Image (cartoon, rainbow, N blue to C red):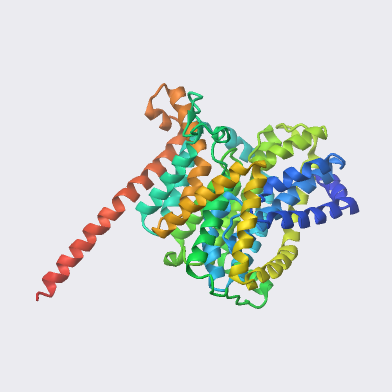
Amino acid sequence: MPEALAAALTSVFTFEVLLTILLSALYGLFVGSIPGLTATMSVALLVPITFFLDPVPAVAAIVTTTATAIFAGDIPGALLRIPGTPASAAYVDEAFTLTQRGESEKALGASLVTAAIGGIIGVLLLTLFANQLAGVAVRFSSMEYFWLGCLGLTSAVMVSGGSVVRSALSLLIGLMISTVGIDIATGHPRFTFGAIDLLDGVSFIPAMIGMFALSQVLRTVTTDLQTESRVSPIGSLFGYMVGTVRRYWLNIIRSSLLGNVLGALPGAGADIAAWIAYSISKRFSKKPEKFGKGYEEGIVDAGSANNSAVAGAWTPALVFGIPGDSVTAIAIGVLMLKGITPSPRVFQTDGDLVYAIFLAFIIANLLLLPLGSLAIRLARHVLTIPKRVLMPLILVFSILGAFAVDNTTFSIGIMLVLGLLAYFMESNDIPIAPAILGIVLGKVIEKNFLITMIKTEGDLLGFFSRPIAAGLGAVTVALWLYLCLAPLLRAMRNKRQTKQSESENPS
């Protein structure tokens, strides 16, 4: 290990690699901050350039672009309510509410510092425990993934604003949308109405843009188009970020650990990690009543888990060649093109390159602090644009972002339809975020449910037949019982208190 680490230091701290990291960081911030362009898309656009680079700068470009683009996606989320990733949807309403109060720099400052620290903690854990995390990952079968997906959906219902019933309704709407496409078991089209573009299902990027951005445009146009956005500077952004770390250091460590472990599970990753971290944050917060109303603690926890999971996703990618997410799937292809095959012995065979990846991650997250601070300072000027000009611009970006997914106008149609659906949902106090998570995780849960049913020959008790699955299942079922019984118990307690007060104070 010392020799490999020394070789990695020598290969990374060269002018070529450091310049590549700097340019990739700027590129990731730029692309990630454009509504509709995700970190995956920014990495995919970078792949042709990596063909002409040596292995170390090629992989450094990918990891740097990923780290910066993930944070940059929070910028349109906080300012325009267009989350950059599905994981960002966990805290986009929290950040946008702060922006509406004129505290956009507070929202983005909390997101920036937790992104950097969460990413660094994730890399350190990856460096020290990659083999152990990979060992945990390979023990997960369809049963564990099913319960993990259910746990993520349950967390979304628990932490969403409004009543549990409305949150559950939103989740069911998202799950219903996720059933569109080819039936996994029979191969028969479902709810496609003859549209070939729907055979692969509803793409979550146009869905996310429509349900968050377009619905916000419609609500602004119909309610407060003439109201000017307030921008209240918080003074020293660096001082605020230091204060955030001091107040929430325990939250950052807890959520970074959680995000790294879940990020190492292929198919789980940041989406579930952010929601579960947000749910845990609200459960153990000293001020849970502030969540959903523009409270930075939720951003701190979900943001730390989100960015730590990015590093965690490299664990199965490097050790087993199993992509933890779509970005690492692209990275595996680049590694193989450079003659490096991921395997359990990758630390012995290509240790210098592996540690070069880790160093590039750390440098990228350190660079994120000054570059991200500059991006925040520049982005706040968006709020000075009059809403009658800003709303059409958001609509144009939304259309471009939806079109960029697969270069078809059908995606624009999906964005418009789901935007209208979200507008009517929010008009009736039905939250949007659970629906988005339902769209993202619906197919994952369905696939693992069907695989498990085939394995167990239809025996539902088979979902509890493995130790980890039994533990996750017990926690999830307990939460379901709590969600079902809590309103009834609360109503009984209120009724008893009312009777007691009437008996103590007879009229």
| Above-or-below relation of 436 to 81 | above
| Residue 160 visible somewhere in the drawing | no
Q: Quadrant of the N terminus?
A: top right
Counting from the top left corner in percent of width and height, residue 397 is at: 65, 56
Q: Is residue 142 above or below residue 421?
A: above
- Which is nearer the eye, 346 or 391? 391
Q: Quadrant of the C terminus?
A: bottom left
Which residue shows up at 36% across the image and 57% down it?
163
Q: Residue at x 46, y 28 (%)?
A: 450
Figure disc tally = 0
- Furthest-right residue in this view: 15
Q: Give the vertical position of 294 relative to 69 (above or below).
A: below
- Could you tell whether 416 is left or right of 466 in the image? right
Q: Nearer the viewer, residue 444 or 230?
A: 230
User: In the image as oriented, which residue stretches furthest toward the top?
Assistant: 457
Foreground residue among 107 and 79? 79
Residue at x 41%, y 21% (from the top left corner): 457
| Residue 445 in view (yes/no) | yes
**With 41 as the anchor, is 90 left or right in this view?**
left
Give percent across and percent down for residue 265.
58, 39
Residue 352: give x, y in percent of width and height: 82, 41
* Residue placed furthest toward the left: 507
Q: Where is residue 365 shown, x and y percent of the image? A: 72, 57
